[in-house]
């Protein structure tokens, strides 16, 4: 039960009688982005409280941490592909005249990828706008007081825009593959095309997951009652999205300059 | 149903992991007995099976290795025990305040629960492969291409190999999720004021192990994806330009089979430490718990152990090349990998010396968990001493494909790891059930297992030194020049059957103690870690405020 639902709180720091009743999990504090202090006296450092009672940021921090480690593992996945990319560039065969022939034929990157890159950068921008709007202090405070859902209302269009741009990016990648296929360059044609398709394909798969995450965030904006949960879902989806954007810049640079 | 199956409770998830490991270890043991049987008496007919064909033998090797390495040695000690014990060991039950009910939880409990389901799915997929057309994969738990990349290369290499790849990919995902949850737990759910240098060494080793899971299993996942696309999507990452299968010359675009070996062992060697680090941490903790006197310089010893654990974790990523000395590697690279491999013996020896010092000066109280810990130390030393021998490229080029290597890793990782698991079960059983396991049966189990372990794996050194290749299905026919080793192999087989039979004592003890074990005091071993209910004054002394 929200303390704010019953009556408007006069002070933010709770008296012991409030904190010792059933705790909704975030210490009964408004989930704003900074830590209000003052009033109430006593030890104001929340790090000294037991785990689970260290204020609204605690759960968010934990989820961000989990996402961060999962992404670290994911980056290792791409590092594997990239190191194999460099290894494969030097493979070749020996022809009947005893000459070593490199098999790697550099691939011309379809120009549409530049447009896709711009779209992806733009989507990161809209995602960040959506993320910031669920942390806007005034609106969060209003929600915490039970005055409607201004954060969800403001985040919704940004998230929808991001999902649309992300889908556009995936469609753009598909078109790039179609263009290559129409030139007769398929996954199995050449070592360089193996890696072009593998890297862009693996990245596109991650973006499909990203769009699914944004869809989940949209559903959470609709269904999740606690604002903390909505913040967590939007925050994690957007960090995932940003990391995939930066990763794409690196992979794109690799495909252009390192072939 | 909701309480024991679809739950996020860390203890239930931990027990699910242990049961999964138990199922896998029973399966893996039966497979190894079939292998031993065939190696010793190649002409014998198995009831209901007939004669084991060479490809069946290879399928048995593959399934045995995959089950034991992934589903026993990784799933049980790292993912399972961490989930079972870690949240409480970090003070989860005290952190909510003395008057609150027990509320120890993993930091991301749903992720943790999801990981065990993915692992179970992986196990089911793997166990289904023998029933697919062609049977199970035959390319060993390392799945070297081109054998694993060409479906025509063997009977199990079409559907069986695809099933293997799927199972391993699922297992990778499960372990990654479990590691995320372990790391987040260590970072966010420690008792307030518990500093890093106050964490128990078990917690340290689970933490370091989880940190190793990310780089290792992500690489394996990527490699599995590339192997899949080689098999089905027309690429050639791992194919050599020319390959001969059944006298048919196959030509591919040039890839590199060595690339797979690099990727696989970049995963594979850290994996060995992921499996054995929890056992090492457990050993340190148990030796501390069971020694009457704290050995001199205890605090200094603690710091050394922590830094050795971290050093092993880091060096573990720099030694993968020693698995490839005979694969056609640049000799300079071999030299470098050899030196790094010998370097990893330094932190390992530091830990061993600390254990030995504690054993000699600690004045140990005797109990079954301690016996198994001592067994771990013994097996770890015996198996570990052959490590620096195999780390030298020159010696390894003779020994690499022989039974010597089988003896080495079964002692240092397999048997030692299993002994540590037994120690963990005997040690934490009272915590979970409130009952003690039978000491008398435990002692029989320990001594028979110790003798059995040495009787099975020590003679393998001699078979290896005599030059017996490790993947030969039988010592008759074209391999008849090794027939002088048959008596030795028969002895090993008999010992293996006895060792397996000994484990029935353990299963009996486990089942009987669940129902009729003696009621246990709250803290039967006088342990000082926080998963046990500790007295108030002890808490005040060790964790002020």
Image (cartoon, coloured by chain):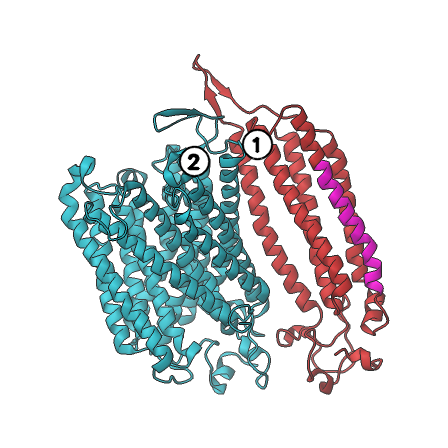
Chain colours: A red, B cyan
Q: Could you tell me what secondary structure mostly forms the magenta stretch? A: helix
Bounds of the magenta span?
A: A150-173
Front tag of 1 and 2: 2
Q: Where is residue B223 in the image (x, y as percent from the top left)?
A: 50, 42
Q: Where is residue B308 in the image (x, y as percent from the top left)?
A: 42, 59
Is B232 or A58 nearer to us in this picture? B232
Q: Where is residue B447 in the image (x, y as percent from the top left)?
A: 23, 68
Q: Label 2 near label 1: C-beta < 8 Å? A: no
Whether A163 is drawn above or below B98: the answer is above
For label 1, the SS is: helix
Name the disc covering residue B357, or none. none
Residue B146 makes an appearance in the image: no
**Do tags 1 and 2 sit on the same chain?**
no
Q: Which residue has dot 2 on it?
A: B151
Q: Tell me which residue sits at (53%, 53%) in the image.
A: B173
Whether A183 is drawn above or below A18: the answer is above
Name the disc covering residue A194, or none. 1
Residue B443 makes an appearance in the image: yes
Q: Tell me which residue sits at (76%, 49%) in the image.
A: A163
The disc numbered 1 marks a residue on which chain? A
Quarter of the image where the N terminus of chain A is located: bottom right
Q: Position of residue A43 (x, y in %)?
A: 69, 79
Image quadrant of residue A65? bottom right
**Residue farthest along the front direction in this orientation:** B48
């Amino acid at each position: 039960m929200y303390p704010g639902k019953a009556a408007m709180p006069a002070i933010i720091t709770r008296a012991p009688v409030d904190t010792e009743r059933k705790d909704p999990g975030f210490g009964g504090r408004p989930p704003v982005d900074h830590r209000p202090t003052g009033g109430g006296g006593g030890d104001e450092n929340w790090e000294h409280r037991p785990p689970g009672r260290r204020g609204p940021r605690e759960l968010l921090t934990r989820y961000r941490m989990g996402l961060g480690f999962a992404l670290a593992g994911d980056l290792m996945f791409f590092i594997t592909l990239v190191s194999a990319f460099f290894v494969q560039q030097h493979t070749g065969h020996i022809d009947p005249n005893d000459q070593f022939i490199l098999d790697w034929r550099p691939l011309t990157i379809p120009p549409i990828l530049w447009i896709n890159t711009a779209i992806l950068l733009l989507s990161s921008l809209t995602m960040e706008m959506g993320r910031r709007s669920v942390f806007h202090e005034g609106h969060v405070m209003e929600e915490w007081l039970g005055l409607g859902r201004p954060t969800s209302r403001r985040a919704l269009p940004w998230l929808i825009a991001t999902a649309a741009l992300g889908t556009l990016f995936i469609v753009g990648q598909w078109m790039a593959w179609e263009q290559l296929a129409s030139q007769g360059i398929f996954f199995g044609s050449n070592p360089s095309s193996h890696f072009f398709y593998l890297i862009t394909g693996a990245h596109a798969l991650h973006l499909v997951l990203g769009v699914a995450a944004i869809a989940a965030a949209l559903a959470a904006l609709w269904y999740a009652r606690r604002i903390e949960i909505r913040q967590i879902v939007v925050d994690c989806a957007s960090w995932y999205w940003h990391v995939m954007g930066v990763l794409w810049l690196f992979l794109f640079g690799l495909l252009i300059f390192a072939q | 149903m909701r309480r024991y199956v679809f739950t996020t409770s860390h203890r239930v998830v931990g027990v699910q992991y242990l049961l999964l490991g138990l199922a896998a270890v029973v399966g893996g043991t039966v497979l190894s007995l079939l292998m031993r049987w065939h190696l010793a008496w190649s002409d014998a007919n198995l009831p209901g099976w007939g004669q084991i064909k060479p490809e069946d033998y290879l399928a048995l090797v593959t399934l045995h290795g995959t089950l034991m390495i992934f589903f026993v040695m990784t799933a049980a000690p790292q993912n399972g025990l961490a989930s079972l014990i870690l949240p409480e060991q970090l003070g989860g039950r005290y952190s909510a305040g003395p008057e609150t009910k027990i509320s120890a939880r993993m930091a991301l409990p749903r992720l943790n629960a999801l990981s065990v389901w993915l692992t179970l799915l992986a196990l089911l997929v793997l166990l289904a492969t023998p029933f697919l057309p062609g049977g199970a994969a035959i390319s060993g738990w390392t799945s070297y291409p081109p054998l694993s990349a060409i479906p025509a290369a063997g009977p199990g290499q079409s559907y069986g190999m695809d099933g293997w790849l799927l199972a391993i990919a699922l297992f990778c995902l499960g372990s990654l999720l479990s590691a995320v949850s372990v790391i987040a737990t260590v970072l966010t759910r420690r008792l307030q004021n518990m500093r890093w240098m106050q964490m128990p060494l078990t917690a340290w080793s689970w933490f370091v192990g989880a940190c190793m899971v990310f780089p290792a299993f992500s690489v394996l996942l990527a490699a599995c994806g590339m192997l899949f696309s080689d098999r089905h999507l027309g690429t050639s990452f791992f194919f050599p330009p020319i390959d001969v299968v059944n006298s048919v010359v196959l030509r591919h675009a040039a890839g590199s089979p060595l690339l797979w070996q690099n990727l696989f062992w970049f995963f594979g060697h850290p994996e060995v430490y992921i499996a054995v680090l929890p056992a090492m941490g457990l050993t340190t903790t148990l030796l501390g718990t069971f020694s009457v006197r704290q050995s001199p310089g205890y605090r200094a010893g603690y710091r050394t152990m922590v830094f050795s654990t971290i050093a092993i974790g880091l060096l573990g990523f720099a030694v993968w090349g020693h698995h490839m000395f005979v694969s056609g590697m640049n000799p300079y690279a071999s030299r470098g990998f050899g030196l790094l491999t010998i370097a990893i013996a330094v932190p390992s020896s530091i830990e061993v010396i600390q254990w030995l010092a504690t054993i000699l000066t600690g004045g140990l109280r005797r109990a079954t968990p301690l016996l198994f810990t001592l067994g771990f130390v013994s097996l770890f030393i015996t198996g570990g001493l052959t490590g620096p021998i195999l780390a030298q490229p020159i010696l390894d080029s003779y020994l690499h494909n022989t039974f010597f290597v089988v003896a080495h890793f079964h002692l240092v990782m397999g048997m030692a790891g299993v002994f540590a698991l037994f120690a963990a079960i005997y040690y934490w059983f009272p915590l979970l059930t409130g009952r003690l396991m039978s000491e008398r049966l435990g002692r029989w189990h320990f001594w028979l297992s110790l003798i059995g372990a040495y009787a099975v794996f020590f003679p393998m050194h001699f078979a290896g030194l005599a030059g017996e290749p490790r993947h030969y299905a039988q010592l008759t026919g074209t391999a008849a020049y090794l027939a002088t080793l048959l008596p030795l192999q028969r002895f090993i087989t008999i010992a293996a059957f006895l060792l397996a039979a000994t484990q029935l004592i353990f299963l009996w003890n486990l089942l009987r103690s669940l129902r009729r074990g003696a009621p246990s005091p709250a803290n039967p071993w006088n342990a000082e870690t926080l998963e046990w209910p500790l007295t108030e004054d002890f808490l005040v002394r060790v964790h002020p405020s």
